[in-house]
Image (tube, rainbow, N blue to C red):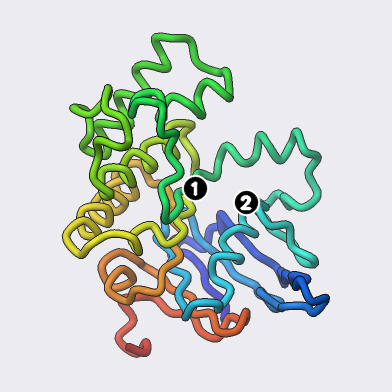
Amino acid sequence: MHSSSPTDAPPLIRLVEVSKTFVLPDGGTFNAVRPVSLDIAQGQIFGLIGRSGAGKSTLLRLINLLERPDDGKVLLNGEDLTRLSKKQLRIARQNLGMIFQQFNLLQNATVYENVAFPLTLHGRFNKKALQERVHECLALVGLSDKLQHYPAQLSGGQKQRVAIARALAPRPQVLLCDEPTSALDADTTRTVLDTLRDINQKLGVTIVIVTHELPVVQALCTRVAVLESGELVEQFDTDDHSAPR
């Protein structure tokens, strides 16, 4: 199914017939993603939904080549990431922030140090600019008062918001979210979704979110793709009243 943004601009992300098969310990194979083609427009909040094992997390990881597709193309801003050198891919990935279900924070580092970490890796910031960017990102997620706290002192929702701030620090165009609320209760989920929506609206960051929770899709996403057994079976805009419920 073809999708286009209202301005018919080329998609920010385009997947062309990407597929991924894993070899199992017994020597068999598992087709996690069968050939899938997908367009994601600049500024969308795009949901990938499906049952457990449908291939949605694998598909998300194909976007930033955490998993390399067996076949197909992964285009970001019209550039095929699968054809880049390691150095070129490292640079391109700076446009692709990512958050995970389990937060993946550095436990022995403060909130400030966690958010600063990707900036120190990139080496593009002097100390003053780095401090300003960390403060800016923590203000965006409502955690300016937690700078010197450690992850163990935070709630689950606060940890996820620190992870969001860290992912945003290098100013990516895209935020990839792998089941970011599935470990959280309903109230905390709402806070995290509000944070993501705020980031999308204020910064124009494109968000791709994997979830099996329909309330997340209904509360956040502007467009949705449904996966089943590694295949893309359906796409629809969430304001499309003819879409399945």
Which SS class for mark 1? strand
Residue type highlighted by circle 1: Met
Depth order, front residue of 244/138: 138
Question: Split into 4 quadrants, where in the image is the N terminus?
Answer: bottom right
Going by the picture, which residue comes out furthest to the front? Answer: 26
Question: Split into 4 quadrants, where in the image is the C terminus?
Answer: bottom left
Give the x, y percent position of residue 114.
41, 29
Marks 2 and 1 in Cβ contact (< 8 Å): yes
Which residue is label 2 attached to? 64
Q: How far apart are marks 2 and 1 (CA)?
A: 9 Å
Give the x, y percent position of residue 143.
22, 34
Q: Residue at x 47, y 64 (%)?
A: 5
Q: Please indicate whether residue 10 sits to the left or right of residue 65 in the image.
A: left
Q: Residue at x 65, y 40 (%)?
A: 92
Which residue is label 1 attached to? 98
Q: In this view, does 74 lie above or below 130?
A: below
* Crowding at mark 2 (Cα within 10 Å: few <14, some 14-19, many 20+): many
